[in-house]
Amino acid sequence: MCNAFCVYFQRGRAILAEDSEMTKGFSLKFWGVRGSVPAPGASTVRFGGNTSCVEVRAEGRLIILDAGTGIRNLGKALKRSPGSSPRDITLLLTHTHWDHIQGLPFFLPQLRTGSRLSILGCEGAREGLATLLARQMESPFFPIPLRGSPANIEIQELGGVEFRVGNVFGRSLSANHPGACVGYRLDFKRRALAYFPDNEPHLGRLRILGGKVRPDEVRRAREGHAAMVAFIRGVDVLVMDAQYDSEEYTSHVGWGHGCLEDVVSLAVEAQVRKLVLFHHDPDHTDAKVEQMARTARSLARKAGSNISIQPACEGSVLTVGDDV
């Protein structure tokens, strides 16, 4: 469980305007979809090469999921359109592996006087969240320290699994990934989004290793699987790590990333409406990502499900209305 902890850096008056355009339901925009390390180049230009970052809008609120390299372009977009920048920005971090925080030093709103940025997440490996985020911006790694930022930055470790951002109700659940890592579920006006960018479905390891797994590990895996199904059940959109195909996964069991087959099975069991394949492997070309999406749809059809499946693509927007 994460321990409660809060630290404040420089106080400043919030001057950014409230967003008045997106007031119904929620929308997602993908700014970074790649896993592990940025992968720019001609073979990744369609789906994108930046690491994890998703923008969520709900009732004028801006919630950012992770601060991979994609957050840099999000910050530039907010600067170009200040009218679309809410007074308060909330950043939810799943964990502090590099591909989820390395864009934060280049996020322009945190370099602007009067901005207010709230960063929420769980404590990293044996060190506080504030310490870890500040350290990557210390010499000799970066020229501008986090405490030198002109923005009002609040860093808070989640003391429990539930929280609120305005009228958005949030919950966290531990992901099956090395180190301290969580995923999030956001509920707003009877609509729901779940985000697990780094997660290895618990039953995948059992499927591959079979009788080599100890009975206590089998029990924990099944308990973890049941908890995940309950957590994501019925969400409108599930953004989930699907880094490996079935052949690749056999040599990556235990690495903390999803096999396409297991991710589709999980989403179908949880009766998710739309599955977005996320955390594309840095070595996967656009053609490979599209091929995996086709395979995922075929797997869902064979399971008798009409779930909608698509690969995450930089710049793409998903909108979920508040109609019921």
Image (tube, rainbow, N blue to C red):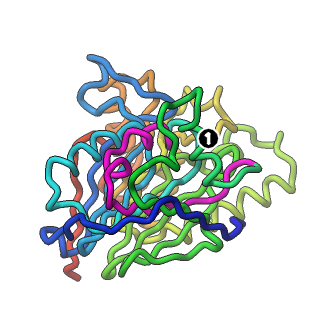
Vertical order, 106 against 153 (above or below): above
* Residue type beneath disc 1: Arg
Q: Secondary structure at mark 1?
A: helix
Picture quadrant of residue 43: top left
Q: Residue at (68%, 54%) from the top-left corner?
A: 128
Q: Give the magenta part as a residue range.
A: 100-125
Picture quadrant of residue 186: bottom left
Which of 243/5 is in front? 5
Picture quadrant of residue 108: top left
- The image quadrant where one finds the C terminus is bottom left
Which of 16/256 is in front? 16
User: Is residue 133 on the magenta stretch?
Assistant: no
**From where the camera sits, is residue 283 visible?**
yes
**From where the camera sits, is residue 298 visible?**
no
Left/right of residue 126 with respect to residue 290 in the rendered view: right
**Count of numbered labels shown in the rendering:** 1
Residue 221 position in % (x across, y down): 72, 56
